[in-house]
Image: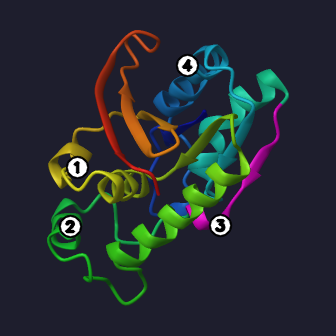
Amino acid sequence: MTTFYLVRQAEAASTLDLPEELWPLSEKGQAQANQLIPILGNLRIQYVYSAEDRRSLDTVLPFSQAYGLNILVLSELREHNIKAHDVSLQRQAWANFDFSLPSSESNRVAQRRIVLSIHSLMLHHLNDEVAVVMPTCLIALFLNAIDPQFTFDQWQEQGIPDMIRLVRGEYNISWTRIDHARPLLALVRNQEHPSL
């Protein structure tokens, strides 16, 4: 059984002085990253993948240092540059998956990219426990790909950081949201969908 944990980045300290991919974690975000150490440790994570932006890397760095795991950086986990903090733009992109800005990918293109990336990783890590840290929009697009009932509004309800447990069986993928208040107990949704 292959188990993946999709981890949303911790809170960023946004600033106009830096491009978004260089934003560091806020003080609260640093605390959130430290809180992931025992949570991911209890899940017996063996491999850690991250998007290449600073926020993603800094989210998982305390855990990887505490457990002596290398962070494997994948460009395929990058943001698709439809500004995540602009809710009206994001809503427009979810209403029309072919919508994009001049310097961005559409949701359709980004969704195809993240599905192929996670599928490839799952084939490479049969029977492993793997954490993947990436932007929230990509987590949402992946969930929508395996569960078309997953909506924009559900995405907006994700916590910071949020964690989704994916289990790939022989014929399906099930997903469960982990409740950070009770990380080992509260699995608040469990859906099974055809395997990628």
Quarter of the picture holding the N terminus:
top right
Query: Which of the two discs, 4 and 3, sits closer to the camera?
Result: 3
> In the orientation shown, which residue stands out farthest toward the front?
171
Distance between mark 2 and mark 3 Cα atoms: 23 Å
Callout 3: few (<14), some (14-19), or many (20+) C-alpha neighbours within 10 Å? few
Instruction: Residue 87: say if magenta.
Output: no
Where residue 13 appears, x then y in whole percent?
Answer: 47, 45
Q: Earlier in the sequence, mark 1 or mark 2?
A: 2
Distance between mark 1 and mark 4 Cα atoms: 27 Å
Query: Coloured how?
Result: rainbow
The disc placed on residue 35 is 4
The residue beneath circle 3 is 75
Callout 1: few (<14), some (14-19), or many (20+) C-alpha neighbours within 10 Å? some
Residue 76, above or below 172: below
The residue range painted magenta reads: 69-77
Where residue 101 appears, x then y in whole percent?
Answer: 32, 84
Callout 2: few (<14), some (14-19), or many (20+) C-alpha neighbours within 10 Å? some
Residue 23, above or below 184: below
Q: Earlier in the sequence, mark 2 or mark 3?
A: 3
The residue beneath circle 2 is 94
Q: Earlier in the sequence, mark 1 or mark 4?
A: 4
Q: Quadrant of residue 144?
A: bottom left
The one of 76 and 91 positioned closer to us in this rendering:
76
Distance between mark 4 and mark 3 Cα atoms: 26 Å
The residue type indicated by label 3 comes to: Ser
The residue type indicated by label 4 comes to: Gln
Instruction: Residue 70: say if magenta.
Output: yes
